[in-house]
Amino acid sequence: MSNLLDVKEVSKHFGAHKALNKVSIAVPQGSIFGLLGPNGAGKTTLIRIINQITMPDEGNVIIDGEPLQSKHIRDIGYLPEERGLYKSMKVGDQALYLAQLKGLSKTEAKKRLKYWFERLEIGDWWDKKIQELSKGMAQKVQFVVTVLHQPKLLIFDEPFSGFDPINANLIKDEILRLREEGATVIFSTHRMESVEELCDDIALINKSNKILDGKLLDVKRQYKINTYEVGIKTNNKLVLQNELTEKFEIAPANFKTLDDELKLNIKLPQGEDPNHLLSYLTTKGEVSHFVELIPSVNDIFIQTVKNN
Amino acid sequence: MNHLPLIIKREYFTKVKNKPFIVMTFLSPMIVIALIAIVAYISKVNNDKVHLISVLDESGVVGEVFKSSEKIKYNVLDNISLEAAKSIAKETKSYGLLHVQQWDDFDAISNKVYFYSEESPSLIIISDLEKKIGDELTNLKLEQNNVNVATVHHSKISIDIVQENFDGEKTSKMDSLLKLAFGGVAGYLLFMFIIIYGNMIMRSVIEEKTSRIIEVIISSVKPVQLMLGKIIGTSLAGITQFVIWIILGGVLMTVVSLIFDIDMGQLQTPQQDMMLQAMENSELNMQIQNVMASFYHLPITNLIVAFILFFIGGYLLYSSLYAAIGAAVDSETDTQQFVLPILMPLILAVYVGIFTVIEDPHGTVSVVFSFIPFTSPVVMLMRIPFGVPLWQQLVALLLLIFTFMFTVWFAAKIYRVGILMYGKKPSYKELIKWIKY
């Protein structure tokens, strides 16, 4: 699969401060790409460069095989973290205005807005002013405005902030549906569970440098610790635990089971077949639990940023 | 993609449809006219009041001068003491008591005339009395010296110097007054326009920042386009408001003066009164003709073209700076430290215009300030009615355009960085740094 967006060795300075240092990312066509990093790492600067709000000092950006230029504005939909709408302007009027700024004709924009407003059940807000709406309601309007011109690339910065769980779910489904329809999504958030849930690829930026990127599964594989969570029913837990301590690297584990099992995290040496462990354990008692521990994005995030 | 028309349209319509704007547009001329009407009405009531003045003429010569008129009635008292006259004056509720003492000689009379009153008397009445007594005594003295008064009056010659420049264009005193008025109005209009609508632009930029919509907009539009769209849209709304004010003001003025029968022209200060009195001597018709002639003497085409060019140039120069300030700060309360340095050259321009240009429209100070781009729009507009060589106008205009392009570039730089900066009030040092980003 080809890349929709290629950011190549992009650097950006603000005075003496280096906001981005030769950062490269590749966003595959049709993927959901998680752009992660602590606050102040340079994510927003990178997103602004992709949106041509700021120009990079060095490096270049390729979108859909072409160098990024002003005509690509209409190919990108951007939902910034710092977002808002004109407070005293009517919802419909300002949605039309923003859509026209993205190059849609007035009639076309109106048609699509009607569709989206129906879809998100906000049809009767057309003549309301933003200041009359709640924050979550305004966010819905903002989401519609972002996706209305059917951009190839959607950039969402903390898209779920301000939404209640029901609406957050609704928006999540819409994002997945837009991806189904061919859009590519860059997704920047601090909510690791939604990264876990949505992203195919991730990149981690820390202190202006990219420190990690790749397919989410590859990254996880890379951070795999060869540790298995096991539960065994046995008559004498202490004896078994001592026996296992001699053979493996173990740590106490904590998970819920029905009976009083021995619960352990067992770390295998590199290259050891987990089947051997399982068959060994079955000789010691009834194995009720055997799960490979997969590092969460959260763990990977914290670990890499700390080590960096 | 050129979104400028779209942005201008939005800026214009949100301004024009904004309730406070509509209210201000229609209410302010009403308030102003109402104030004028009240003042006019009061001064009319004041004017219509008949003053009674008691006169005690011990000299026995000037008594005949005081013939009662519509506004002033004289009560000439004879053969009573000053104290008695005073009490009569009080009883009759006179405006005051005029006391002309016994005299020996016409010259000695000048400090022998007294006016007693409850409150200090109005300047107009005093000068009127002085004139009346003075005229009468002059006539009497002329007669005493065997001079025929009629002959003296016949012999009076009034001079009106015809002014003409070397190219044969005629000017006159009336000309100068009219020129002053023209230049003053043009300069002052620009000054007002910059302050009112510059502030409006600034507020509209701040609004975009505080509502956090700016990043959404900026991802589809170049900041310069947004800034220019804002300036042009707001200016068009401003022009709309100004035109409505002028039309509405004119209509209201006519209606009010018809209904209340108030002659707005009656709104005169004592100075104007005296000027009118002085003018009455020469023929009024001549004056009117003079005004008309003066009007045609003004370099009308030059004025209009220069007005438009300098107005637009000056306005854009300042409004782009206002936009930059709006972008640099987070809230309106933070704007003051930046607005003041902008206002200073503007106020300076108006002062130079009022004090120096009137005195000497082609003096060094006037000429220098009419070249400096930050003051040239106001000062040049004030100078042009007095005739400014074309090359000077062109140089000033070029300088203005050059500076205007520079400030727009400068403002756009600050704007571009500033609109995405939140939470801190920038210092001048930081603003300079932003330009390098």
Image (cartoon, helix red, strand yellow):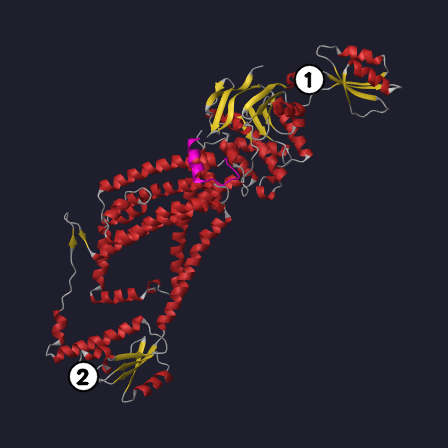
Q: Is residue B213 above or below residue B90?
A: above
Q: Residue at x 36, y 72 (%)?
A: B48
CA distance for labels 2 and 1: 128 Å
Residue B61 in the image: state x and y as whole percent.
21, 83
In the current view of this chain or complex, which residue is farthest to the right? A235
Residue that mark 2 sits on? B104
Q: Is residue B396 above or below residue A258?
A: below
Q: Quadrant of the C terminus of chain A?
A: top right
Is there any visible trace of residue A148 in the rendered image? no
**What amino acid type should be assigned to the residue bearing mark 2?**
Asp
Residue that mark 1 sits on? A224
Marks 2 and 1: CB-CB under 8 Å? no
State the residue in front, A99 or B415: B415
Q: Using the rendered view, name the quadrant where residue B116 is placed.
A: bottom left
Residue A211 highlighted magenta (yes or no): no
**In terms of secondary structure, where does tag 1 sit?**
loop
In the current view of this chain or complex, which residue is farthest to the left? B146
Magenta-highlighted residues: B420-437
Q: Residue at x 38, y 36 (%)?
A: B408
Residue B429 highlighted magenta (yes or no): yes
Say whether residue B244 is left or right of residue A30: left
**In terms of secondary structure, where does tag 2 sit?**
loop
State the residue in front, A221 or B192: A221
Residue B102 in the image: state x and y as whole percent.
22, 85
Residue B417 in the image: state x and y as whole percent.
46, 34
Disc 2: host chain: B
Residue A230 in the image: state x and y as whole percent.
79, 19
Nearer to us: label 2 or label 1: 1
Q: Is residue B136 above or below residue A246?
A: below
Q: Residue at x 17, y 50 (%)?
A: B169
